[in-house]
Image: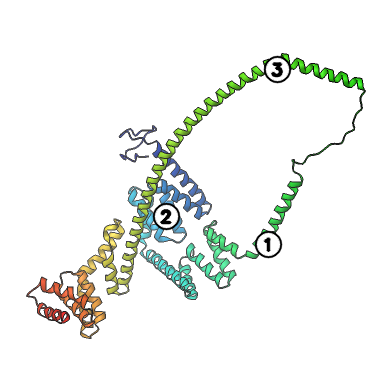
Amino acid sequence: MKCFHCGNRLGKGDLCLTCGQDVRLFKKILAASWRYYDEGLKKAQSRDLTGAIVDLKNSLLLYKGNTEARNLLGLIYYEMGDMAQALIEWVISDNLNPNDDHAAKLLSKIQSDQVELERGTLMIRKYNQALRYAQGGSEDLAILQLNKVLSVSPHMVSANLLMALLQMHAGQNERAEKYIRHVLKVDRCNAMALHYKELLKTKDVRKSAVKEKDFVSKEAEIRRQLSGNDVIIPTYKENHFGFHTILEVAAGIALGAALVAYLVMPSRISSLKSDFDQTLISYNERLSAKEAVIAAGEDEIQILSDRIAKLESQVQNADVQMASVIGEYDKLLQAQDALRVNEYLQSARIYLTVDASVVTDEVFRQIYGQLQEEFDDNGYKSLFPAGLDLYNRRKYESASEYFKVCTDLDPDSIEAKYYLAVCYVRRDANEAARPLLEEIINTDPDGAFTESARKFLSNITE
């Protein structure tokens, strides 16, 4: 265990031996994080993957450096068919702790099998497409896409759940039940699967509810009848005494009452009053002690609340940063996929939108470097001739798309800017052409395209 302030190893005390920082609260937070990890591990071993995810996220919420919890969370995502989320957790774990052999091995295993990695990426895209089909009302197309996904990734929980929902909506309850059973084999406590399972037997549930309500009502009635609040009045026979006996008993009672009143009661009252005073003092002392403990506890609660708020803020910032990282990963993979299927213009467009400064991961840097090298060497050379061919065939709208990417790849190219501006003029987009023509004239007053640029600028100004 290392100090959060200086990074040196901690001892058994409440203070860091190196920097003197108070680490009591830090140790409590770490202990709580590891307890959540232990609970998550037990649930994962018993196939309660949903519950395990909740516990592991709580563990990481308390201490993001718990790489054991993060590695296990990644394994659970991988088991549920969510490869992208698993890779994210392992990459974070590897960055937080470069000496973590477990995370490095998991990443190496996935990255070494490029076919598996590409297949996983493709399945995620197909699932997203199926989800869009379902949201748009094209349920048949969604089912076809999901069949492709499940044929390759049968453990993908989200795909099985979506398929079950579509089958239920189509009235195919037996098929829906098959997909629900498959989800529960992977994650036996999946809340959505259990909910769908209950929906399939709605009528039986309603009958059971009626029976349960009747039983509860009868039980309540029985308890009311047997309540101890009812008063049982016994029967008795009145005894008859003689007149003298009654007088003797009454006289004895009066004499006893007098003796108690004058001899016993004063000392008894004094004793009771003294006991009451002592008891009252004792209660006051205990109450003061408890109030002091409560006040100290409230101070500690306030300190813990402030620390928790700070940790939550850090976690939220990390979530925002992670969402940005995932977005850049997604754009990078889309650019790579487009390049692979020879959609060169689309690949270049996506590549130009990638913000490489957001991600420091080595895998990301490697893929981005390959794309950067490709477009630096061949991007302009490949796209400009294609755009010029479209321009010569008077397909100005299509040509402008190529010239626009060329100007982004090479901002100093006067030639690309000129043809882009002319395409805009031919399309009556004069406001878009104007700044390009002015830039050509100001940047290269004696260039080959300057005189033509002046003429075009003069025409659109008139």
| Residue contact between numbered discs 1 and 3, judged by CB atoms under 8 Å | no
**Foreground residue among 224 and 270:** 270
Q: Secondary structure at mark 3?
A: helix
Q: From the viewer's perspective, tell me whether residue 116 is left or right of residue 357.
A: right
Q: Dot 3 corresponds to which residue?
A: 265
Q: Are marks 2 and 1 in contact (CB under 8 Å)?
A: no
Nearer-N-terminus badge (1/3): 1
How far apart are the two marked residues, 1 and 3, measured between alpha carbons? Answer: 69 Å
> Which of the two marks, 2 or 3, is nearer to us in this view?
3
- Residue corresponding to mark 1: 207
Q: Is residue 241 above or below residue 57?
A: above
The answer to which image quadrant residue 441 occupies is bottom left
- Identify the residue shown where x is 81% and y is 19%: 253
Q: Quadrant of residue 303?
A: top left
On screen, residue 201 versus residue 121, left or right, reads right
With respect to residue 120, does 290 lie above or below?
A: above
State the quadrant of the C terminus.
bottom left
Please tell me which residue lies in front, 128 or 287: 287
Give the labeled residue for mark 2.
74
In which quarter of the view is residue 373 placed?
Answer: bottom left
The chosen color scheme is rainbow
Left or right for 378, reference 42:
left
For the point 62% across and 20% down, the residue is 273
Q: Nearer the viewer, residue 450 or 252?
A: 252
Q: Secondary structure at mark 2?
A: helix
